[in-house]
Image (cartoon, rainbow, N blue to C red):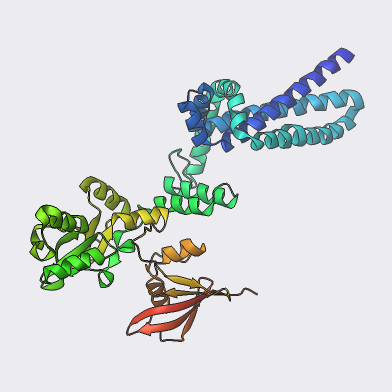
Amino acid sequence: MILSLAAVFLAILILIMLSAFFSGSETALTATSRARMMALEKNGNGKAGLVNRLIEKRDRLIGAILLGNNLVNILASALATSFFIELFGAAGVVYATIIMTIIVVVFAEVLPKSWAISDPDRFALSISTPIRWVVFLFGPITALVTGVVRKILSKSGVNLTPETSLLSAHEELRGAVALLHRDGSVVKDDRDRLGGLLDLHELEVSDVMIHRTNMESLDIDTPVKKIVSKVIESPYTRLPVWQNEPDNIIGFIHAKDVLRAMANRGKKASELDITKIISKPWFVPETTSLQNQLNAFLRQKTHIALVVDEYGEVEGLVTLEDILEEIVGEIADEHDQEITGFDPQADGSVIVEGSLPIRDLNRALDWDLPDEEATTVAGLVIHEAQMIPDEKQTFTFYGKRFAILKREKNRITKLRIRNVLKG
């Protein structure tokens, strides 16, 4: 009698340990980093490869673990009930329910799951081999159960195909970066750079181009000496050259080509033939994505292109530097002019130029103003107001108050933006 009770108690103890194993394994394998496992597998870690193969078929893995966990829990509860009935009679059912609930929750659920979540990668590696055998043993039953569940849910219009994903790869990466930044593992600058890289396929060249009204260009009919002087004085190494009218751009002139031509046989500036040293223009549609344009720049081995609309009219120009700045932020050298797009004020507001890109303002102040419908701050205000505001008008949207400080003709040139107080 005593021997049989001891055997039952030992069996219950073993089943509780198995339940803890299944609970911890489930948590570890669902929380482990696939990127970390891929890196370990690449470095020759066989267990990491096993973990990757297990989580590739996540529905089969979770089904096998849940099946094993439920089996040992039910068996442990049944044995515990018989054990306490043997000791206390009919009241043993109550004792078994209370005691097993406490033991299972504390020692078979909370404790192993907390242990696993504290270091899921190491835990997953340590249990990968026994879990492989669990999946192998329970795999056929799990497949049958999963098939039945999918059929039942499909009748309700719920699709459980493993290929279905709610998030794209870009969204998953963006969410992971945002989470790591919130936890303090990724600093703001790194978050912005990674975000900029992920945004390249969503942005078009029209979002980052220099508009034609701000382009510095040269008239081919200008005296050669004056052209050379402007090229040398310009902060840019490449300048568009036009003929007859500013929109008729016939090529680009490179400062190095000018200096090289002048150094050749000691020519003077007035003796240069500008038409022989300008390069042919490269035109790209304004709807070209930044990712495609970056690849095109690398293939063409050039750094500048003219942006045209659907009618072939020049809208502006885009450079390789403009695209790279979307990833790494502002790139400046000793010849660049200082860009003054916004000026923070002592009262917490910020004065910005209307032409300041919304993305630059968001990146600088860690704001989240939308840039889908407008590229610049002025464009955003006009889009939201559905009008061209007058000076001293104010508007409130997206948690910010926009005050128009200066307007030139139909252009908003200066605004004051402040956070709206919540109360």
Task: Between residue 51 and residue 341, name the one nearer to us.
Answer: 341
The quarter holding residue 230 reads: bottom left
In the figure, is residue 356 to the left or right of 14?
left
Q: How many marks do you count on the picture?
A: 0
Residue 3 lies, with reference to residue 215, above or below; the image says above
Note whether 166 is above or below 93 in the view shown: below
Toward the viewer: 249 or 18? 249
Q: Is residue 319 shown to the viewer in this render?
A: yes
Front residue (pair 189, 148): 189
Residue depicted at x 66% and y 32%: 23
Quarter of the view holding residue 78: top right
Q: Residue at x 26, y 65 (%)?
A: 234
Residue ID at (49%, 36%): 35
On-image quarter of the N terminus: top right
Coordinates of residue 224 in the picture (x, y in percent): 12, 68
Position in image of residue 56 (x %, y %): 48, 32
Up the image or down, 417 lies above or below 24; here it is: below
